[in-house]
Image (cartoon, helix red, strand yellow):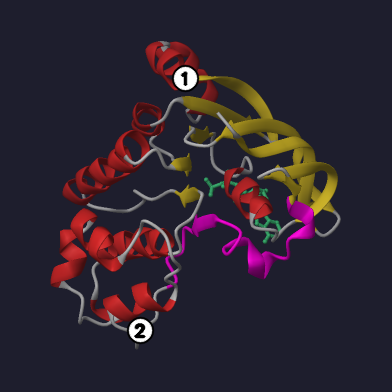
Amino acid sequence: MRELLAVEKVSAGYGESIVLEDVSFAMNEGDSLALLGRNGVGKTSLLVTLMGITRLHRGAIRWDGGDLAKVPTWKRSRAGLGWVPQERHMFPTLTVEEHLTVVARPGPWTLQKVYEVFPRLLERRQNMGNELSGGEQQMLAIARALMTNPRILLLDEPMEGLAPIIVQELVRVVRRLVKDEGMSVIVVEQHARLALSLTERAIVLDRGRIVHDSDSASLLADGDKLDRLVSVA
Ligand SMILES: Nc1ncnc2c1ncn2[C@@H]1O[C@H](COP(=O)(O)OP(=O)(O)OP(=O)(O)O)[C@@H](O)[C@H]1O
């Protein structure tokens, strides 16, 4: 399998302050990774580091064989990084369909395929961004990233604050993306067991450092260890 992403001894942060220390991991095309850890340990910072929003103090990030630091932030979506931020950034005056078509780039993900995955968005296609429920907004945020035809999807707490029935629907979608579509995914989740059930591999951060790296199934099977790593003491 071809290497897609390699994070090598990365220390990064905001201005002079460093929030990620000596972080290293690599992913091949089609890999799925759960990024776990308690609140404030640096999970979002790691995703935004991939998007070029933090300051890279040390280390390197290889993307598709090249140096990601050389790709400016605004070009990273075009380079294939499909970021779905925690704040969903909907436009109140655009319809669902306009949200999807303005970002569309050529590839297997078309409007038709996205509507097939999210039938709810097809029903809502003429609704404005501010007329959607939280769950519909999250579906639209993921659908919008898919329309860019990304090589990797970066999901930042996609289930946060959503009703159980919507969580079930999103789990079905993420599982389909990972298992059937072979999409490369990094998923940040507070619901560790859920994230582990969706992915092949997991890393756990604590105070900006990787403190655990294994396949997801073995961490899921070791409940005591998982609780020690991610639960609030
Ligand atoms: N824009 C910013 N400027 C300065 N410091 C920041 C900024 N964003 C986050 N931090 C700090 O970086 C550290 C890591 O935060 P981050 O949001 O990456 O953690 P997290 O694991 O994603 O947490 P959560 O689960 O609460 O979202 C925290 O100490 C936080 O205060």
Does residue 12 lie above or below 220 as drawn?
below
Is tag 1's residue or tag 2's residue first in the polypeptide sequence? Answer: 2
* Of residues 199 and 165, the one drawn nearer to the viewer in this rendering: 199
- Relative image position of residue 76 (x, y in whole percent): 63, 61
Residue type, mark 1 in image? Leu
The segment highlighted magenta reads 68-89
Does residue 145 lie above or below 212 as drawn?
below
Mark identifier at residue 197: none
Q: Answer whether residue 71 is visible to the viewer in this image.
A: yes
Q: Residue drawn 63% across and 55% down?
A: 48
Mark identifier at residue 226: 1
- Relative image position of residue 25 (x, y in whole percent): 66, 31
The residues bearing labels 1 and 2 have C-alpha atoms spaced at a distance of 40 Å
- Mark 1 vs mark 2: give the one in front: 2
- Relative image position of residue 143 (x, y in whole percent): 34, 61
- Relative image position of residue 26 (x, y in whole percent): 64, 32
Seen as rendered, the residue at the extreme bottom is 93
Label 1 SS:
helix
Residue 223 part of the magenta-drawn span: no
Does residue 119 lie above or below 193 as drawn?
below
* Of residues 74 and 160, the one drawn nearer to the viewer in this rendering: 74
Residue type, mark 2 in image? Pro
Q: Residue drawn 80% across and 51% down?
A: 56
Label 2 SS:
loop
Relative to 30, is 144 on the left or the right?
Answer: left
> Residue 221: which quarter of the image?
top left
